[in-house]
């Protein structure tokens, strides 16, 4: 064998080895990202706080992210409701007297219904009953899997169907981040038709939101972002590159309020503008100048309540 052939073989071996290593790392990271650890396991610390051995472990195998647990319950009287979606999901139904309607509330990634109690209380004070949902894999719901809004779209449909069966006429869907993406996908996939919807900071596509996480760490997204999306979808039984809330928005014909923080490092203004452009019903975009990917109610309480209240008043579905 010539020196030239030996060098070529070494080079090809290096390329194959690197390809195998990248896919192995992506496989483990994708699984850890879409499957929560057992409750009680300590969440992986900031990499800056880890020793060398643990940094290498996280780099190769991904982070530990324990299943979100509801550490709080509603202060108001409530009913716990269990529904059968792709898995059994747990919900809280808070009813108010002389209710103007019901707001179904969906949390974001790595959240749960207890973390939405502050927003639920605002809706209650505005005269609306609320129905808070633990998506599959979180809180009191079965499993440990999360698909960043893809399979959760079925949870949206199941909850909407349940509340509708209570003879509620005015149903509002509220979702933040992953919850917003799930609402948009439910609109396209199941042709849902609530009275209206309020969505906060939905990402443009699965690939875009994965790239954003790399960019936050000042790491080039290519090629690992694509590999993560590929393996994450494969492990969870769907083609993740097709998970595209921007495209789903075209199916939305009901009134929608879209909320966005101008300093959001996870969702770009371009993604938000495209979602808004594609909405086909009555719509409004409201932004918060200094907010990131966060709970707008905490930082912009007066402005958030003003936007929510005005939208609900303008788009209330009244009994026939």
Image: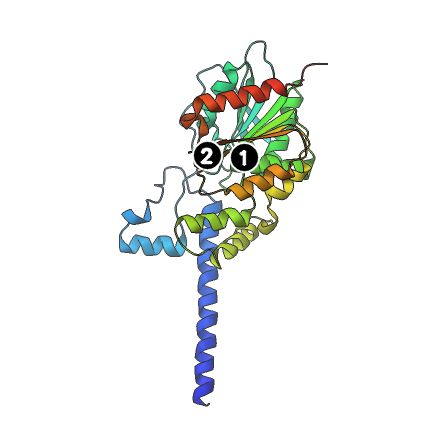
Q: Which residue is mark 1?
A: 179
Q: Which residue is found at the position 53% from the left and 54% from the top? A: 231
Dot 2, how many residues are within 10 Å of its Cα: few (below 14), some (14-19), or many (20+)? Answer: many
Position of 135 relative to 239 (above/below): above
Residue 64 in sight? yes
Q: Which residue is mark 2?
A: 111
Dot 1, how many residues are within 10 Å of its Cα: few (below 14), some (14-19), or many (20+)? Answer: many
| Colouring style | rainbow
Relative horizontal placement of residue 213, taking residue 307 as reference (left or right): left
Image spot of residue 230 (x, y percent): 55, 55
Q: Residue furthest front?
A: 289
Image spot of residue 78 (x, y percent): 51, 17
The total number of labels drawn is 2
Q: Which residue is found at the position 69% from the left and 32% from the top? A: 253
Q: Secondary structure at mark 2?
A: loop
Mark 1–mark 2 contact, CB under 8 Å?
yes
Q: Residue furthest right?
A: 320
């Amino acid at each position: 064998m010539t020196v030239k052939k030996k060098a070529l073989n070494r080079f090809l071996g290096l390329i194959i080895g690197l390809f195998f290593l990248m896919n192995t790392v992506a496989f483990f990271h994708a699984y850890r990202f879409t499957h929560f650890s057992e409750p009680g396991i300590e969440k992986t610390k900031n990499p800056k706080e880890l020793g060398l051995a643990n940094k290498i472990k996280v780099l190769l195998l991904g982070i530990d992210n324990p299943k979100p647990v509801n550490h709080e319950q509603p202060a108001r009287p409530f009913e716990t409701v269990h529904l059968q979606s792709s898995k059994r999901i747990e919900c809280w139904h808070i009813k108010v007297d002389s209710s103007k309607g019901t707001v179904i509330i969906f949390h974001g990634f790595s959240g749960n219904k207890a973390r939405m109690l502050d927003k639920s209380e605002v809706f209650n004070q505005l005269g609306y009953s609320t129905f808070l949902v633990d998506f599959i894999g979180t809180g009191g719901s079965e499993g440990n899997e999360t698909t960043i809004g893809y399979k959760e779209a079925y949870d949206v449909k199941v909850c909407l169907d349940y509340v509708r069966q209570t003879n509620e006429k005015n149903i509002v869907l509220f979702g933040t981040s992953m919850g917003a993406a799930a609402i948009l996908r439910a609109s396209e996939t199941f042709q849902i038709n609530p009275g209206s919807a309020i969505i906060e900071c939905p990402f443009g596509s699965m690939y875009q939101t994965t790239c954003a996480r790399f960019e936050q760490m000042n790491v080039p997204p290519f090629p690992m972002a694509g590999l993560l999306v590929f393996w994450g979808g494969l492990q969870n039984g769907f083609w993740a590159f097709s998970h595209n809330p921007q495209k789903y928005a075209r199916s939305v014909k009901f009134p929608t309020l879209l909320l966005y923080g101008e300093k959001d490092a996870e969702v770009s203004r371009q993604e938000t503008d495209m979602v808004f452009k594609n909405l086909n019903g009555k719509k409004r975009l409201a932004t918060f100048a200094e907010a990131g990917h966060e709970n707008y109610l905490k930082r912009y309480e007066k402005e958030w309540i003003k936007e929510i209240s005005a939208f609900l008043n303008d788009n209330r579905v009244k009994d026939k």
